[in-house]
Each structure stands twice: as C-alpha cells, then as structure tokens.
Amino acid sequence: MPTPPASPPHVRSLSAVNEDIRALQVDGGLLSEKGSRRYEELLVEWAAAVRGDVTEAA
C-alpha cells in the first residue's frame, strides 16, 4: 500500500523572511560567521516563500 505524500512544510510569508534578513544587517554590511549561516538559511526560506507565492498566483 503506498504511503500518503508528506504534507508540505510550513512556509512563512515573504515579508516575515525579509524582516529577518533586514535584522541581520550590521554596520558596514559585515556578518559574523553565525550571522552568515543564518543569512544562508533565510535565503533558502525566502526562495521557498517565492515559489509558494508563484504557485498561489497560478
């Protein structure tokens, strides 16, 4: 018997992700190593949110 598809992960809104990205900004545009990792995670989340918006619009 096939297993049911997994439910899609929760995707936050673009504005929520953008707010978190803006909060990482520091003087001179430099991020700590931890901040850089968080920024990369937020970019992945941002891309997922963009895909979600495109899917909804279609």
Image (cartoon, grey):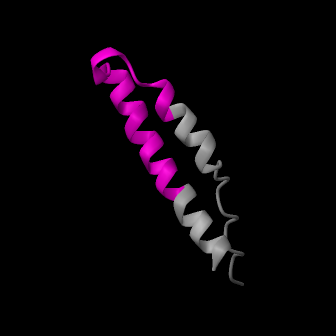
Q: Position of residue 46 (x, y in %)?
A: 50, 50
Relative horizontal placement of residue 48, taking residue 31 as reference (left or right): right
Question: Magenta segment, principal secondary structure?
Answer: helix
User: Quadrant location of the N terminus?
Assistant: bottom right
| Image: 41 above or below 22 | below
Quadrant for residue 29, please give it.
top left
Q: Position of residue 30 (x, y in %)?
A: 28, 21
Q: Position of residue 19 (x, y in %)?
A: 56, 34
Query: Does any portion of residue 50 appear in the rendered image?
Result: yes
Tell me where the magenta segment starts and ends, as one range: 21-48
Furthest toward the front, the residue is 28
Which residue is depicted at the point 63% across and 80% down? 58
| Image: 17 above or below 36 | below
Number of marks: 0
Given residues 11 and 5, the one toward you in this image is 11
| Image: 56 above or below 37 | below
Relative horizontal placement of residue 43, taking residue 55 as reference (left or right): left
Given residues 40 and 50, the one toward you in this image is 50
Given residues 44 and 26, the one toward you in this image is 26
Residue 39 lies in the magenta stretch: yes
Residue 31 lies in the magenta stretch: yes
Q: Position of residue 6 (x, y in %)?
A: 67, 67
Query: Does any portion of residue 30 appear in the rendered image?
Result: no
Relative horizontal placement of residue 26, taking residue 20 as reference (left or right): left
Quadrant for residue 27, please give it.
top left
